Image (cartoon, rainbow, N blue to C red):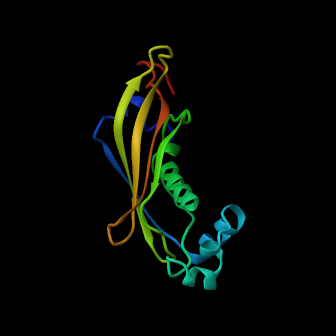
Amino acid sequence: MKKNDWYFEDFFVGQEIDLGTRLVSEEEIIAFATQFDPQPFHIDHEAAEASIFGGVIASGWHTCSMMMRMVVDGLMSASSSMGSPGVDAVRWLLPVHAGDTLSVLYRTTKVKASASRPDRGVVWSRWAASNQRGELVCTIEGMGMFGRRPAEGLHA
């Protein structure tokens, strides 16, 4: 894909985009958590073993960050994305362990052209991350702004 393969007009309700997979390593779990979420079950083997999780797990924020990277790599970097006015909901449904392989599915839930700014529109979406067993581990619901396709004869 190249930049601007995806414009606002390319999104439709019910659309699903498979964003691929990502293997989660213990090193990245501990590195992320050490810097941003240093709770014992994210960074300390002994404490994590004694916790309800039975071992080191990824921070929920790390899971969201991995999902964001997959959305950028699989969609946003080849789009007319103009950023996002916000996220409405995040749910951490199951812990993510080292060795898990995450799959992310992007589902378009609503689209609306801007009435006040004809060069853009808003796309609402739900991102769903599942592990290698097909278990849903995290969902993110929010919106993004995308540029409209240029008029015929104009070059992007």
Closer to the camera, 38 or 30? 38
Identify the residue at the far left of this view.
14
Identify the residue at the far top of this view.
116
Closer to the camera, 105 or 73? 105
Quadrant of residue 128 within the rendered picture: bottom left
The answer to whether residue 115 is above or below residue 69 is above
Q: Residue at x 52, y 76 (%)?
A: 98
Residue 40 horizontal side relative to residue 130, left or right: right
Q: Residue at x 30, y 42 (%)?
A: 15
The x, y position of residue 55, in whole percent, is 53, 81
Closer to the camera, 116 or 54? 54
What is the tally of numbered marks visible in this picture?
0
Q: Residue at x 42, y 30 (%)?
A: 8
The x, y position of residue 42, in whole percent, is 61, 72
Closer to the camera, 145 or 41? 41
The answer to whether residue 83 is above or below residue 59 is above
The answer to whether residue 76 is above or below residue 44 is above
Residue 2 horizontal side relative to residue 44, left or right: left
The answer to whether residue 45 is above or below residue 126 is below
The x, y position of residue 77, in whole percent, is 52, 45
The x, y position of residue 134, in whole percent, is 32, 67
